[in-house]
Structures are given as C-alpha cells and as structure tokens.
C-alpha cells in the first residue's frame, strides 16, 4: 500500500470495527476486471465472502473467500441463475456494479450499433443487476455501490456516450436510494482515469500522463486501492447515513 503526505496511514492490519465485513456476502459484477478484482481482494481481506461475476471465463480455481461465476449483464437469465444459487445461502449484503465497457467516440460519430452496445452493458446492465441481485436485499437490508465515472459528471474529451450512460447510473443511484430506503443504501463512485484494462490505451502513452498530471490538484493518478477503499467505505457501517450519493474521485480535476 502506497502512502501519501495528505493521508494518515494506520497500521496495515488495522480494521476499524465499522469497516469489519466479517460474514458479509458481496457480489461484484465485472469482478474479473481491474477495479472489480482489486475490490474483491479488499472485501475478502475484511472477512467477506465475495461472488465475482464476469462475462470473461472463470479462473481455474477460486481463492479463499472469492468464488467466480461467468455471467453476462446483458443476459438477465444468466444473472437469475446465479441469484438462485446465492439465495440458497444467507443472501447478499452488498452489491457492487463494477462491470463496464468503453468505446471512445464523440456524440456525432457514435453509430447506432456502438450506442446500443455501450448502453446495454453500462446502463441496462446496472438496471438488470440491481433488479436481480439488489431487489432481494430489501428483505434483510444491505448496500449497493455502482461505479459511475467522472465522465458522467463533467464533459471531457471523447467519452460522450459512455459519460451519458454513467450520468444515468448516478441518477439511477438516486432513484433506488429513495425507492429502496430504508432497507438498502445505494451510492455510486465517479472515478477519473485509473490505470486498468479499460484505460490501457491511455496510459500506454506517456504524453497522456505528462499532460494529465499538471491538471490534477492532488498531483497523482488514482490507484485500484483508492477505488477499492472508497467502495468498502460506501458498503460498510462507516457510511451509514449516506445514500443516493455519487462520490467523485478525481484528485480535484473537476474543481478547476
Ligand atoms: N479504469 C478507469 O479509469 C475507470 C474510470 C471510471 C469508471 N470506471 C468504471 O469502473 C468499472 C471497472 O472498470 P475497469 O477499469 O476495472 O475496467 P476492466 O475492463 O478491467 O473491467 C471491466 C470488467 O467488466 C466486465 N464486463 C464487460 N462486459 C460485461 C458484461 N456484459 N457482463 C459482465 N461483465 C462484463 C469485463 O469482462 C471486465 O472484467 C467500469 O464500470 C468502468 O466503466 C473505470
């Protein structure tokens, strides 16, 4: 874990009781992706049992506390099959929607096929996942965290259709926070570009980083740990009074 001068870092093994997720059942869509996998590790470290759902093939073996299932958020039946399996146990306490795809295009250049594909995964996929996995959580209570994007908060470069879907995810977050209160808290995060499979085309280019860094007040690129820790916070008792919120995680870029 990296340390930063503006963050007091406690002992590596310290777990605040409000972050203790011992015994919690967590499902992460896009659980094999860069941010999903880092988040799964963070939850497992805090004692949760994590279901990682992804369209990509499952690994040869599961790790302790983390089980993998293959499913496609554009295919409701594949999600329902996993929910059936989960319902045989104690049920979910936490749902994290961390799946997503990016096709960089401006609005005018976005053809119908690209628009539909992006929307079906980035927006409709969150709708299906919340209905299938989130809705049953209303019985015993729980928490949902959706991964939006800073592209859904401010308009920046080529990422417009994606940004529109992420803005809709933030609004869905507000709607569900009201509809499913008080049983379920629903929040979102809106990160800036974090090195991942999705952004490898950006970070492969050193010019991108050279141009980007001076625009960030905190003068650093976010890490997968930054994201995982914020998601754990929004899922845990530490954020008990927070619902309907989209937490912008951009080192301050959108402030200036
Ligand atoms: N990395 C960033 O800079 C960044 C910034 C803001 C928001 N986000 C969001 O964070 C989330 C995670 O992105 P990441 O950076 O880890 O990218 P990633 O490509 O590493 O992970 C995305 C995962 O989603 C899975 N996925 C795609 N389509 C799916 C489908 N139809 N059904 C099930 N799973 C599917 C992929 O297989 C992949 O494992 C996404 O929602 C992304 O939009 C990422």
Image (cartoon, grey):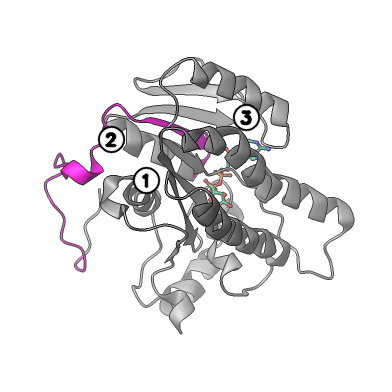
Q: Where is residue 182 drawn, in percent x and y? A: 42, 49
Residue 224 among magenta residues: no
Label 2 CA crowd tier, 10 Å (few <14, some 14–19, many 20+): many
Q: Give the camera-side residue of 98 and 27.
A: 27
**Residue 56, numbered label:** 3
Spatial CA span between label 3 and label 1: 25 Å
Please indicate whether residue 15 sits to the left or right of residue 204 in the image: left
Dot 3 or dot 1: first in sequence order is: 3
- Residue drawn at x 53%, y 60% is 174
Dot 1 or dot 2: first in sequence order is: 2
**Mark 2 close to ligand 1, CB under 8 Å:** no
- Residue drawn at x 67%, y 32% is 72
Residue at the farthest left position: 11
Q: Give the camera-side residue of 30 and 181.
A: 181
Residue that mark 2 sits on: 21
Residue 32 among magenta residues: yes
Q: Nearer the viewer, mark 3 or mark 1?
A: 1
The residue segment tinted magenta is 5-34
Q: Where is residue 109 drawn, in percent x and y? A: 84, 67
**Mark 3 close to ligand 1, CB under 8 Å:** yes
Does residue 49 sit above or below 128 in this rendering? Answer: above
Spatial CA span between label 2 and label 3: 27 Å
Residue that mark 1 sits on: 235
Q: Nearer the viewer, mark 2 or mark 3?
A: 2
Q: Where is residue 242 drawn, in percent x and y? A: 37, 58
Dot 2 or dot 3: first in sequence order is: 2
């Amino acid at each position: 874990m990296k340390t930063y001068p503006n963050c007091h870092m406690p002992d590596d093994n310290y777990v605040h009781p409000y972050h203790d997720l011992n015994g919690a059942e967590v499902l992460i869509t896009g659980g094999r992706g860069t941010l999903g996998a880092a988040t799964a590790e963070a939850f497992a470290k805090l004692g949760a049992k994590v279901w990682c759902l992804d369209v990509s093939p499952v690994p040869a073996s599961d790790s302790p506390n983390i089980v993998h299932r293959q499913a496609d958020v554009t295919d409701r039946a594949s999600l329902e099959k996993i929910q059936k399996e989960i319902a045989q146990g104690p049920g979910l306490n936490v749902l994290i929607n961390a799946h997503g795809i990016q096709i960089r295009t401006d609005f005018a250049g976005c053809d119908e096929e690209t628009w539909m594909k992006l929307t079906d995964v980035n927006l409709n996929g969150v709708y299906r996942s919340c209905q299938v996995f989130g809705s049953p959580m209303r019985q015993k209570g729980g928490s949902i965290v959706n991964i939006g994007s800073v592209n859904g908060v401010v308009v920046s470069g080529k990422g417009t259709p994606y940004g529109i879907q992420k803005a809709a995810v933030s609004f869905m977050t507000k709607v569900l926070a009201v509809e499913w209160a008080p049983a379920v808290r629903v929040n979102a995060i809106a990160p800036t570009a974090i090195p991942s499979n999705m952004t490898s085309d950006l970070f492969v280019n050193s010019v991108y980083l050279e141009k980007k860094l001076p625009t960030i007040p905190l003068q650093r690129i976010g890490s997968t740990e930054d994201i995982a820790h914020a998601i754990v916070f929004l899922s845990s008792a530490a954020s008990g009074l927070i619902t309907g919120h989209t937490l912008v995680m951009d080192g301050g870029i959108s402030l200036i």
